[in-house]
Image (cartoon, rainbow, N blue to C red):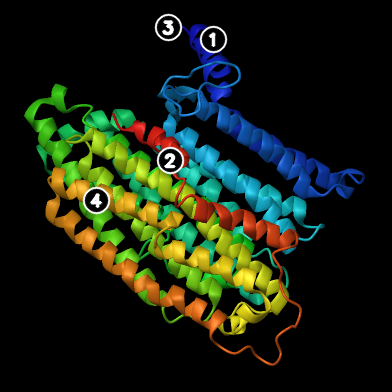
Amino acid sequence: MDLGSILTSTLTDTMTVSLPLFRTELALAATIVLLLVCRMLPLARRLDSAFIALGGIAFATWFAWNDLRGLPGAPWGTPADGVVTPLRQELFGGLLLFDPLTAYVRLLLAGFLALYVPFTLASGIPDREDGADFYAMVLGGALGMCLMASANHLLTVFLAVEMASVPSYALSAVLKGRKAASEAGLKYAVYGAGAAGIMLYGISLVAGVLGTCHLPTMAVELPAIVGEGGGRTLVLALGGLMIAVGLSFKLSAVPFHFWCPDVFEGAAAEVGAFLSVASKAAAVALLVRLVSGIGEPVAEAAGGPVAAAGLAATRQFMVFVIAVLAAVTCTLGNLAAYGQTNMKRLLAYSTIAHAGYLMIGAAAVAALLGTRPEAAQRAVAALAFYLGTYLFMNLGAFAIVALLRNRLRSEEIASYAGLIRSSPGIVIAMAVVLVSLIGLPPLAGFVAKFLVFSSVVEAVRLSTAQPLMLVLLVVGGLNTVISLFYYLKVLKVMTFDPPGDDRPSEPLSLVSLSGALVTGLVVPVAALGIFWSGLYACARLAGRIVS
């Protein structure tokens, strides 16, 4: 093929296939450019950056919704243009992949942004002067997170993680003049730089042994090399562990969680909500992408017994690493949360614990791959549903913390004493969110945890890793019980402890703009505990990445 033919085919593929399925990211990128241009023009600076951001997010959400509806078997029919896209489509020469998981996570992130911007408007952070910079960084981080969900190449994985991380470092220090915020941004950047370096070195080791960074090609080459054993297998294992360091940093998994409590405490609650929800969803999607892409039996039949043995060893290695990290992460997160006195630090350790629960589901996916694809699909669907409910639970919790901070001038749990007497609506909203985070019925958190634990039960019955998955099931159940104590401690302070003498007398009513925002976040938490079939239908579509 000559150079002209290559350029023509590449241009045709880009214009007719890749760009139409890349509209969500293009809308976010265009909004970022518009925000920065308006920042420079004197007349345009009078416009509120939040409404410009909301306009771009509306387009991104519409594109993401149509991409999801355009997939075969979508629960709500075909999109308005009637175009049905393939279930799996490589974009830009294989650097990205469009599939049900990509479409689902894009819609999840776009929906989060559509709720996040009104939340920041109600809470007052950022101010009007810094709004363009703040929202440009938020959308830039979200753009990187969309790429994390669709990455199909190890270099794209690294670039997407960095694109999501670098704006987050700046957002952590967005509270100008506050020493704690500057310290949070510096800690986050230092930890992130170290994790990125380790991850990049791991990518170089894996690419050097396999001769490729393309995930499907890696899945073909990997089983034969692992099956043969020897020094190259050790290098692959080391490289895989180094890549896991970068993923663990984004998930705030133990032992790479040290940045999380300090950053959440020093940064604004609004930034904590962004890091807790959006970053977690993208990291889990990337973890599922790597596990399902490498662990599926694409080369087992063609490679013979050697490839079959290598594939089994690869799955066993992935299951063990993810299971150990999951068990340690949810246990430490729950135990450390119990002694916290600052609400943001408590929610940080809660985020760590929920990362452990999500990794338990990812371990079930890895254990069921190849042997029981239908069960693996249900495990991915359980994770997707968990992320959908987690969006409302954690964003609701941080919204309440931010609004109480504005009213009480404090984020200490002790300052919430006796709030039931002056602001009963806020206390009820917080109770709904915290009880759902525990995982008690009839709220959304119960359904999410039930589905994840059900996938672990299937892995106990159907996979070859029964002892390990049984231990994970017991650890998850015990940690759910442990979490009761620190979540209910907050409610006990709000309801039974007497209020302080210096408490502002003005109540925080739900009949206000801020109250409407809290209500809009809390109602889905209760509704999805009963009417969860619609969200689960989308989650089941996301599970179809496993073949």
The residue under label 2 is: 533
Q: Can you give x and y, in whole percent of width and height, for residue 3 in the image? A: 50, 10
* Between 306 and 118, the one nearer to me in the picture: 118
Above or below 112: residue 84: above
Helix, strand or loop under label 4: helix
Report the residue marked by disc 1: 8
Q: Left or right of 374: which side holds 387?
A: right
Q: Which residue is mark 4?
A: 456
Q: Nearer the viewer, mark 4 or mark 2?
A: 2
Residue 503: % across, % down: 70, 86
Q: Quadrant where the N terminus lies?
A: top left
Q: Nearer the viewer, residue 385 or 231?
A: 385
- Mark 3 — residue? 1
Could you tell me residue 316's position as x and y percent?
17, 47
Q: Amino acid at mark 4?
A: Val
Give above or below for 161 relative to 172: above
In primary-sequence order, the first of circles 2 and 1 is 1
The kind of residue tagged 1 is: Thr
Q: Is 215 or 388 nearer to us in this picture?
A: 388
Mark 3 or 1, nearer chain start: 3
Q: Quadrant of residue 30?
A: top right
